[in-house]
């Protein structure tokens, strides 16, 4: 067990945020510049140190397109488009069996990738398990029940539900720099620095919780702190014991801020694309895998309920149609963009920087995984799920 997060947080909050020297940041920033990397293009072996996430690998069950009832022409069309969008992997499963698997750019099944913010959805799954176990009371709990430094403050009254919905009312903490990659940006210093708890614990409220959707990476990290304090275990241990091993996934890793510190929870579960098929399958099977209830079914349903602040978002994932039509935005926007509505009535979308994707289409038992390490040519979130959906026959229906 690592040192108490509460003690570490109190220690770092005693000094001004911007005034602390951080040799780890200096080393990582220089390495980032030397490699010419940006967040999407950082190699998975660049991160140091990392926390190992032990798995218990179970072989991937496979089937044929004919047995799965998916037209080979649809799979070929999806693969052709994915390849043109700089994808490194495209996988399709139906009813938990792998139907299609294609890799590009020198990658293969055992090549790890960075799922980026798809990792946020995993944290929400772990929150549901912690509630079932009685470690976290409920999503109505004020965050100060776990982040005791905030007791008696307005931000301490924020309910966990608002944080899960990305409607916390907390500031971004970026000093106006947004996503600009510069050492002046506190968010960049946080991401490359030696303490993943300091910036999140410093955030101040700028609005009422639950009212406005405001996607905030640091709110996810706060939920990770909540989870560790409530359970008394490190995040990577919880991930291994409660999801990775029960789902039979291969070993993975997560970046640590420093030796003995905390992992970053808002992104970067360095893992295999094929393992995300089983993460997506949880939203098809009601949280079950191989006859075992891994995540409470009621929690899966709750995660998919639209947020009052933005109907296209649930608990740390995207649900249903998003922005449809209009001018195609450059690269991959924060809010998913579609040229047309989803063909499926129910679509669950795990969204990662640069177009990392899991699409779960529960009504036909479909899960689609797309991975990349370069920006696409012209991204459209409707293409892959609609091509596969229309190519899947369920009892003779398209």
Image (tube, helix red, strand yellow):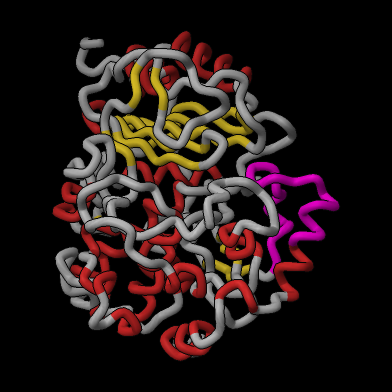
Frontmost residue, 197 versus 83: 197
Q: Name the residue: 48% across, 60% down.
A: 173
**Quadrant holding the C terminus:** top left
Residue 148, quarter of picture: bottom left
Can you say whether 245 is above or below 42 in the image?
below
Residue 237 quadrant: bottom left
Residue situated furthest right in the rendering: 34
Left or right: 42 in relation to 71 = right
**Left of 275 or right of it: where is 24?**
right
User: Residue at position x 33%, y 58% from top?
Assistant: 206
Image: 206 above or below 104: below
Q: Tell me which residue sits at (35%, 81%) in the image.
A: 229
The residue drawn where x is 42% and y is 37% is 358
93 displayed left or right of 157: right
Residue 164: x %, y % from top left: 28, 56
Verify whether residue 170 appears in magenta: no
Stretch in magenta? 29-48
Disc tally is: 0
In magenta segment, residue 35 = yes
Residue 67 shows up from this direction: no
How far across and down, in percent of the image, does residue 29 sit? 75, 60
* x and y, in percent, of residue 153 in the image: 26, 77
Q: Is residue 216 visible?
A: yes
């Amino acid at each position: 067990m690592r040192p108490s997060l509460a003690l570490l947080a109190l220690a770092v909050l005693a000094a001004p945020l911007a005034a602390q020297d951080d040799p780890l940041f200096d080393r990582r920033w220089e390495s980032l510049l030397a490699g010419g990397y940006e967040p999407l293009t950082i190699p998975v072996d660049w991160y140091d140190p990392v926390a190992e996430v032990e798995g218990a690998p179970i072989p991937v069950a496979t089937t044929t397109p004919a047995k799965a009832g998916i037209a080979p022409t649809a799979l070929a069309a999806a693969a052709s488009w994915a390849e043109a969008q700089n994808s490194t992997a495209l996988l399709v499963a139906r009813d938990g069996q792998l139907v299609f698997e294609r890799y590009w750019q020198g990658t293969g099944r055992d090549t790890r990738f960075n799922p980026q913010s798809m990792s946020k959805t995993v944290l929400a799954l772990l929150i549901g398990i912690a509630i079932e176990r009685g470690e976290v009371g409920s999503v109505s709990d004020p965050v100060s029940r776990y982040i005791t430094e905030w007791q008696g403050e307005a931000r301490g009254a924020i309910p966990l539900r608002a944080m899960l919905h990305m409607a916390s009312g907390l500031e971004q903490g970026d000093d106006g720099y947004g996503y600009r990659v510069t050492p002046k940006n506190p968010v960049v210093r946080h991401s490359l620095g030696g303490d993943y708890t300091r910036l999140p614990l410093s955030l101040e409220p700028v609005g009422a919780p639950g009212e406005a959707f405001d996607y905030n990476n640091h709110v996810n990290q706060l939920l990770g702190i909540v989870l560790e304090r409530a359970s008394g275990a490190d995040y990577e241990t919880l991930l291994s014991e409660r999801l990775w091993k029960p789902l039979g996934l291969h070993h993975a890793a997560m970046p640590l801020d420093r030796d003995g510190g905390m992992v970053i929870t808002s992104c970067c579960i360095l893992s295999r694309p094929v393992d995300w098929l089983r993460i997506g399958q949880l939203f098809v099977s009601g949280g079950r895998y191989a006859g075992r209830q891994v995540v409470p079914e009621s929690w899966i349903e709750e995660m998919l309920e639209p947020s009052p602040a933005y109907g296209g978002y649930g608990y740390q994932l995207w649900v249903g149609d998003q922005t449809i039509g209009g001018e195609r935005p450059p690269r991959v926007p924060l809010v998913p963009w579609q040229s047309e509505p989803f063909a499926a009535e129910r679509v669950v979308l795990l969204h990662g920087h640069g177009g990392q994707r899991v699409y779960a289409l529960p009504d036909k038992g479909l899960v689609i995984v797309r991975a990349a390490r370069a920006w696409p040519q012209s991204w459209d979130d409707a293409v892959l799920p609609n091509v596969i959906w229309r190519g899947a026959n369920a009892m003779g229906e398209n």
